[in-house]
Image (tube, rainbow, N blue to C red):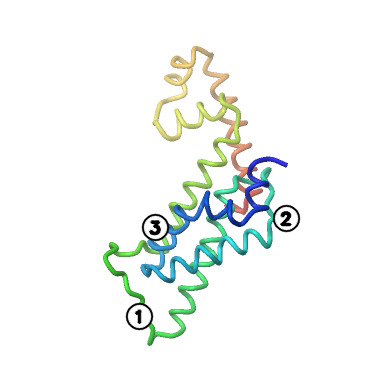
């Protein structure tokens, strides 16, 4: 059993390792401290109860936990929306992020997690060309390999990236 699976087996360990980041996420999403605290507890309890569903081959433990947290906070926002007489307080926190902002942040995190699952060569080629904006020729010169090698790394790297994203449910 690896460290990620060991963490799920103990709710205390889950709380210790992830409650801080999950709380900040829930607070930004909900804008209410007590609701954010409850959302973190709900997230950790769901993760602990459904630990058997976590598959490290499909993604990291933090990505899985934040997916659960997104579902928990979405459920809470829907419940509040269904009862308009309840008003969420934002206390001294800035304005909550919109669903679109949070979804983009989650997708970026899931993409980064998927990129880390690729080989070093594929990841460097994709990041160089698609994120830093270098051409294939410039990337080949920086890597000290032929242009055809970079084209091949891009093709197979993007293919592997797409598969990883499909496996984790990010794309369909």
Secondary element under disc 3, as helix, strand or loop, is helix
Quarter of the figure with the N terminus: top right
Q: Position of residue 34 (x, y in %)?
A: 41, 71
Q: Could you tell me how far apart the alpha carbons at marks 1 and 3 are, in whole angstroms?
A: 21 Å
Q: Position of residue 74 (x, y in %)?
A: 49, 69
Residue 42 vs residue 69, the one in the foreground: 42
Neighbourhood count class around disc 2 (C-alpha, 10 Å): few under 14, some 14–19, many 20 upward: few
Q: Which mark is residue 112?
A: none
- Please report the residue visible at 62 percent of the width from the left and 59 percent of the height from the top: 47
* Lateral position of residue 5 relative to residue 149, left or right: right
Q: Which circle marks residue 87 in the picture?
A: 1
Find disc 2 in the rendering and name its residue.
Answer: 52
Q: Nearer the viewer, mark 1 or mark 3?
A: 1
Q: Residue at x 54, y 42 (%)?
A: 113
Please report whichever mark, 1 or 3, sits nearer to the chain's N-terminal start: 1
Q: Is residue 67 left or right of residue 105?
A: right
Which of the two discs, 2 and 3, labels the residue nearer the N terminus? 2
């Amino acid at each position: 059993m690896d460290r990620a699976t060991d963490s799920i087996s103990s709710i205390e360990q889950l709380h210790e390792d992830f409650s801080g980041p999950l709380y900040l996420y829930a607070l930004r999403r909900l804008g209410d401290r007590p609701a954010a605290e409850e959302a973190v507890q709900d997230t950790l309890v769901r993760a602990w109860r459904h630990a058997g569903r976590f598959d490290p081959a499909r993604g990291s433990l933090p990505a899985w936990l934040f997916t659960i947290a997104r579902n928990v906070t979405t459920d809470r926002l829907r419940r509040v929306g269904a009862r308009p007489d309840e008003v969420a307080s934002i206390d001294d926190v800035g304005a909550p992020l919109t669903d679109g902002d949070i979804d983009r942040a989650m997708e970026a995190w899931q993409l980064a997690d998927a990129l880390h699952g690729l080989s070093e060569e594929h990841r460097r080629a994709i990041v160089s060309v698609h994120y830093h904006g270098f051409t294939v020729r410039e990337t080949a010169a920086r890597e000290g390999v032929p242009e055809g090698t970079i084209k091949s790394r891009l093709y197979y790297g993007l293919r592997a990236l797409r598969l990883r994203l499909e496996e984790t449910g990010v794309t369909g």
